[in-house]
Amino acid sequence: MYWRRRVKCSNLILLIILISASSIFVILKGSLPHISITRIFVDERNMKESRVVAEDVDSVTNGQIGASSYTTAKYGKPVTGKDHLIVYNRVPKCGSRTLLALFEQLKNEKRLATVISTQGFHVPRDLGFAGGQRALKDRINQAIDQIKHLPSAIEGHFRFHSVDRSKNPIYINIIREPLDRMVSQYYYRRFGDGQTSDRFLKKELNRVIDSEYLNQTFNDCVLSERLECSNPRITSFQTSFFCGIHPNCSIPSAWTLAEAKMHVDEDYTVVGVAEDYSGFLSVLEKLMPALFDGIAAKYQIQSKGK
């Protein structure tokens, strides 16, 4: 496809998206998942190609920024019982609709009491980034306080933040090869995906896209170095989602990466990759059987029905 062509963009900064604990899991027979740490990044100088580099856990965590000791880490550890709140702060354009459809099936089967979406939570734009993030956090926490029965789930496009520990939160997420995600987001904003309302598209077009660039290809956007596809805050979008709501999380830096790695290691149970959706679901089953038993099989049925 055309966005896979080698494209020069000298100003595109290093994009480190999959952090030390954002992993592809390999399910071993009769055992817990073995973690193969994966880091996805776009070449700093030319964005010539995206590469996937698998590294051993020790080589990633030994003495590097943001490395977790794994002594208190939740990442990759089994979860017992059902009385938990699943927190799915889904990264846009990473296959979240598929998982939400599976959540609905679990809800219909009475295996989830409630699935709360933050999609309708209104945050005034005049609050600015920091104020808006705080307001959204407060709104989310208010919704969580209203949950009466567990297990339940809350989902939406919101950045990481700590929630009420009395709800026994389980953080999960899915990420995607960064170039694919950027391209998907680029065209989604313009044309939707077949399930997007005309009202949303019109609102999105009026808000973020100059009519002059409506039909510009992603390749041409990169070549012309427009901010929509080369702004470091956009190219490091997935990292900022795990970093959190601090204003500096939107600024690509060693600190941003360290915060993101720390949150994944210490707060998330599973972070899957969209390119291995079946593997991600198998890990959910393996680590949280009381909540997700049979979800991989449901996904296979759902996929065949498309």
Image (cartoon, rainbow, N blue to C red):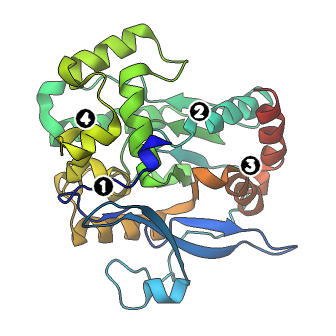
Mark 2 residue crowding within 10 angstroms, few (<14) / some (14–19) / many (20+):
few
Measuring from the top left, give residue 9's x and y in whole percent.
Answer: 23, 55
Which kind of residue does numbered mark 3 sit on?
A: Leu
- Total tally of numbered discs in the picture: 4
How far apart are the two marked residues, 2 and 1, measured between alpha carbons? 22 Å
Measuring from the top left, give residue 8's x and y in whole percent.
Answer: 27, 56
Q: Residue at x 38, y 41 (%)?
A: 158
Mark 3 residue crowding within 10 angstroms, few (<14) / some (14–19) / many (20+):
many
Which kind of residue does numbered mark 1 sit on?
A: Ser
Of tags 4 and 2, the one toward the viewer is: 2
The residue pinned by badge 4 equals: 135
The residue pinned by badge 2 equals: 97
How far apart are the two marked residues, 4 and 3, measured between alpha carbons? 31 Å
Whether residue 149 can be seen here:
no
Q: Are marks 3 and 2 in contact (CB under 8 Å)?
A: no
Question: In the picture provided, is 59 more to the left or to the right than 26?
Answer: left
**Dot 2 or dot 1, earlier in sequence:** 2
The residue pinned by badge 3 equals: 291
Which kind of residue does numbered mark 4 sit on?
A: Ala
The residue pinned by badge 1 equals: 236
Question: In the picture provided, is 108 more to the left or to the right than 133?
Answer: right
* Vertical side of 161 occupied by 111: above or below: above
How far apart are the two marked residues, 4 and 2, measured between alpha carbons? 25 Å
Q: Image quarter for residue 239?
A: bottom left
**Dot 4 or dot 3, earlier in sequence:** 4
* Vertical side of 126 occupied by 64: above or below: below
Q: Are marks 4 and 2 in contact (CB under 8 Å)?
A: no
The kind of secondary structure element at disc 4 is helix
The kind of secondary structure element at disc 2 is helix
Which kind of residue does numbered mark 2 sit on?
A: Arg
**Dot 3 or dot 1, earlier in sequence:** 1
Q: Residue at x 41, y 61 (%)?
A: 49
